Image: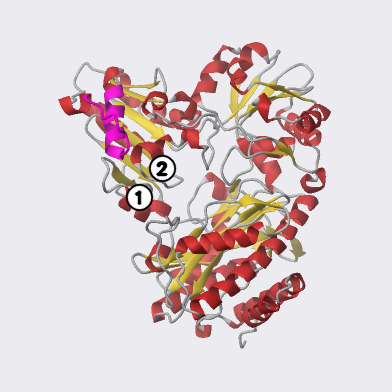
Amino acid sequence: MEFTASLMNTPKDLTTPAARTAALREWMYAHAIDAFIVPTADPHDSEYLPDRWKTREWLTGFTGSAGLALLTADEGWLWTDSRYFLQAAEQLRPTPYRLMRDGEPDTPTLAEVLGTLCGQSAANRTFTVSFVAETMPVTLLGELQQALAGKGSACRLCPAPEDPFDNLWSDRPGLPAAPVVVQAESDAGVTAAEKLDAVRAALQLTDEGGACLLGDLSEIAWLLNIRGGDVDYNPFVLSYLLIAPAGATLFVGAQKLSPAVKDHLRANRVETAPYEAVMRVAEDFCDGGPLYVAEGMNCAVAEAVKSHPDVRYVPSPVPAMRAVKNEAEVAGFRRAMLRDGVAMVRFLRRLDEAMAQGQTLTECDVDTLLTALRAEGDRYCSLSFPTIAAYGPNGAIVHYEAEPETAAVLRPKGLLLLDSGAQYEDGTTDITRTIALGPLTEEERRAYTLVLSAHIALAMGRYPEGAVGLQIDAAARRYLWNHGYDFGHGTGHGVGSRLGVHEGPHQIRKNVRGCTMVPFRAGMVVTNEPGVYVAGRFGVRLENVLLALPPESTPFGSFFGFETLTLCPFDLRPVDSSLLPPEQVRWLNDYHAQVRQRLLPLLSDEADRRWLQQATSPLPA
């Protein structure tokens, strides 16, 4: 490894990605590490990370929620997916990192780059690749080990001897410590004890022994009917859970537990232990029988359980159980959608008035106003993800997030893409509306109408029982494909019941993946969000949340459809009716009639009521 003298003089003021990268390179040199992997991960492989584990963001300056960095003495790479190509290209420009467009045909994978680096290493010298064990999922390490197996002794993958960010990141946040709350059984629908018994049955844990260790925070929250605030936007509790035949142990900070929470856990045969004690789980908490460890566990815990004589890595049975919502959860979704719809109508009316009056609003003002209106609703807890308020060209950045210093000012023309959602005590919402702020170009009207057509096609479609997301995806995309349009993200993702706004195991998308091959079942909740993004000009996305209905039999088989749970008008001003088939116009009018019927009684302001009646006026069929 070659280092220049300048790299050996680490800047004390580590305020830029270049300075932080130089400091990490010094640390690598001191520990004889040739390449260092920094994934976007916490010990629980979460989507949204507690601040303590935002090390990839701290190092590279890229703020997207998905990405992986690789650093050597001379080069830096950052992989991210199509949602963030535009954002990453902008944020990485002043940094030492090269953007790797993950999934593009000409983009090498992490394993391929590491393989090349190993091959270029000097003869008779091992090329050492390292990482922080607690933020490296076992599954990713296994994939890398398999891909590099042919390199023999030339490449060595190993955990770092310490976490370098503990020293380099001088004001690194500590462990989150938000209090735990109990999810009301009337909202959960099933007791924690019943859910734990279902896991025991799925893994055949018997009185003869055996245990299952879970690390996914969403699974633990759902299983135990608890919620917390350790992760932004997701009501999760930083914890691990060991399920044994006769009880369970929750590894969690004791300061988070009120007497009521402790009583709830004891009533469901759940004991507690310190969060850090999970590293002693094999020695102190397991009896005889196999130890099932859920796939996705981090390498630090994997190392800690090696002393157990029978460790078996298995897919967690929880996602499939949780995906099918029970009656109480569905009822909670419906109540949450009513509150969210009211907030959206109140916001959209005020936005229209502000634009008509020539008021100055920025993208951040849009976020602030909508969040405040949501917070006025009953049982509101938080947003379910960072609001995307993207005007004009920013709408083409799929996961754009406005900053006060650079937020665009809204003008009385063009399109505003608004993707937002909230966590309520009884449900989670996710909605996107694209709004005309004034005159539009012909291309904007065309793209908007085709996206609306794609959305309606998926929502009103019927699908054979057992259909998977890969098949359902084409119902929407074909309306875009026929006109030469497409989009890079998925068409739909699962949504949790006051849990994560992105929830597996099912997705609707055009790629062949495990998540797109999951058969849909009645009770599954999924989004419907096709889009079109024209770089540098505008973006359109329209999103509702859907509920899969029980299949109905015909002489040719059983077929299911979806109920649209989201209640909010689509903006009809951009619609080119000539591009909408008559049956889709009828669906749209019926949907707007339902929105009007459900929301009007909940609106006390006469101006809001008038706005909703006008916004849901039927289109000519």
Above or below 604: residue 320: above
Residue 313 picture quarter: top right
Tell whether position 290 is magenta.
Answer: no
Name which of mark 2 and mark 1 comes first in the sequence: 2
Residue at (56% x, 47% y) in the render? 515
Q: Position of residue 584 (x, y in %)?
A: 60, 77
Quadrant into which the N terminus falls:
top left
Rendered image: mark on residue 67: 2
Q: Secondary structure at mark 1?
A: helix
Image location (x, y in percent) of residue 222: 70, 40
Residue found at the very far left of the displayed protein: 5
Question: Depth check: 588 or 27 in front?
Answer: 27
Residue 308 drawn at (x, y percent): 60, 13
Left or right, 355 with respect to 131, comes to right
Q: Is residue 364 visible?
A: yes
Q: CA distance from mark 2 to mark 1?
A: 9 Å
Which residue corresponds to mark 1? Answer: 88
Near-viewer residue (21 or 207): 21
Residue 3, position as x, y percentages in the image? 19, 25
- Give the residues drawn in magenta, as a range: 9-27
**Which of these two is toward me, 577 or 249?**
249
Q: Is residue 403 left or right of residue 78?
A: right
Q: Amino acid at mark 2?
A: Gly
